[in-house]
Image (cartoon, grey):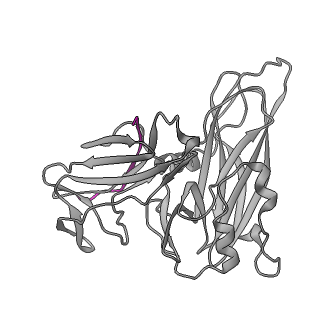
Amino acid sequence: MNCFKNAHIVAGFLTLALFIAWIPAAGWAQESDAVEAPEDVVDPAKVVQVELVANTTAVEAGRPLKLGVRFKIAPEWHIYWSNPGETGLDTKVELVEFTNGKATEVLYPTPIKFISPGPLLSYGYSDETMLVIPVTPELSDPAAKEVTFKVKARWLMCKDRCIPGKKELTLTLPVGTAKPVNEALFDRFARLSPEAGAAPGTEVVAKREGKELTVELTVRPADDAAVVAADGKGMTPAFFFPQKIKGLEWQNPVLPEPDAKVATASGEVVAYTKPFVIKVKGSLSGEAAEVVSVGGVLVLQQWTKADGVKPARAWNVLVKP
C-alpha cells in the first residue's frame, strides 16, 4: 500500500449513507445514535478488522512503549482521518482504564484523499492503517505481574454506503524484561507518518481577521528540481491536510495551476518549478475563539534531473495566527 496515493470512490452513496456520513465528529456518548446497516446487506466485521498490538513483549517501569490500533480495510472501502474533510466521521481511538503511566496524543499516519459524490473531498485511509499511542509505564505497584491496556476505537467505513463501527480492544503484557516485537509493522507506519520539523524550502504563515482564518504555505522548489502536481500511479500531488480544530470549519485547500511538465519513467508529469502557494481558509465560531495555533500535514513529492521522481514525504505543520 502506498499511503500517499490518491484514491477515488466513484460509486454513488445511498441517501441513508450520506446522512450517516454527515454525522459530526463527536465523543463516545453519541455513538449509539448512529444508524446501523441491515445485517443482510454487509457484515461490518468483514469490512474492517481491528486489533491492538504492541512493539514490546513486556512492560518495564519508565521504559516507553507503543501501542498500535491496526485497521485492515476491505478492498474499495475506506475509513477517515482525524479530520474527515467535507464528509465522513473522524476515526478515534482512546486509551482507557490505564493508570500505571502516561500516554501521549494518538499519532495518525499521513492520510490520502477521496472524492465522494457531490463532489465532496474527504481524507482517510484504505487497505490498512495503524494509529499509534505512545505510552510510558510507571508501575506504581511494585508487585504487579502484568499490565492490561484497554482501547476504545470508533470509525466510519464507506464504499457505496457508510456503516459506523466501534470496538473495545484489550491487550495484557507481563511485567519483566522487554524485547522488541512487531518491529517491521511499527517501522512501516512510522515511515508513512508525517515528519517533525519544517519541510525544506517552505514557509508557513497564518492570518486571522475576525472570524476568518487563512493559512498560506509557500513552497520553493530547489534548483534543477520540481514538485509533482499530478495524480497517477506512483505520483502524489502537493497537498495540505488541515488538522481538525473544534469550532473551525475549513474550506478545501487551493493550489495554483502547475507551471511545467517534467519527464518521468511513466511519461510527462505536470509540476511546479517555481515558488507556489497552497492556501486554505477557515471560518471560526465562538468555540474556537481562543485558538492559539493551527496545523496540518503537508505532502510533497519531488522530482530532480539527477534522480527523477523521489518518494513522497510528509511533514507536520504548526503555526500561530
Left or right? Give the position of 163 relative to 253.
right
Q: Which residue is drawn at 76% across and 77% down?
A: 42
- Residue toward you, 182 or 22: 22
- Residue toward you, 24 or 43: 24
Q: Which residue is drawn at 35% across and 70% down?
A: 231
In this view, the residue farthest toward the left is: 223
| Residue 78 covered by magenta stretch | no
- Residue toward you, 73 or 316: 316
* Residue 15 horizontal/vertical position (percent): 67, 79
* Residue 138 horizontal/vertical position (percent): 72, 22
* Residue 109 horizontal/vertical position (percent): 52, 50
The quadrant where residue 87 appears? bottom right
> Does 60 appear above or below 70?
above
Q: Residue at x 39, y 41 (%)?
A: 208
> Does 33 appear above or below 118?
above
**Quarter occupied by the C terminus:** top left
* Residue 296 horizontal/vertical position (percent): 45, 46
Left or right? Give the position of 299 relative to 155.
left
| Residue 318 covered by magenta stretch | yes
Q: Give the range drawn in magenta.
A: 308-321
Give the dominant element type of the magenta stretch: helix, strand or loop. strand
- Residue toward you, 210 or 100: 210
Left or right? Give the position of 183 relative to 162.
left
Left or right? Give the position of 146 relative to 179.
right
Q: Residue at x 31, y 68 (%)?
A: 230
> Does 242 appear above or below 36?
above
The quadrant where residue 262 appears? bottom left
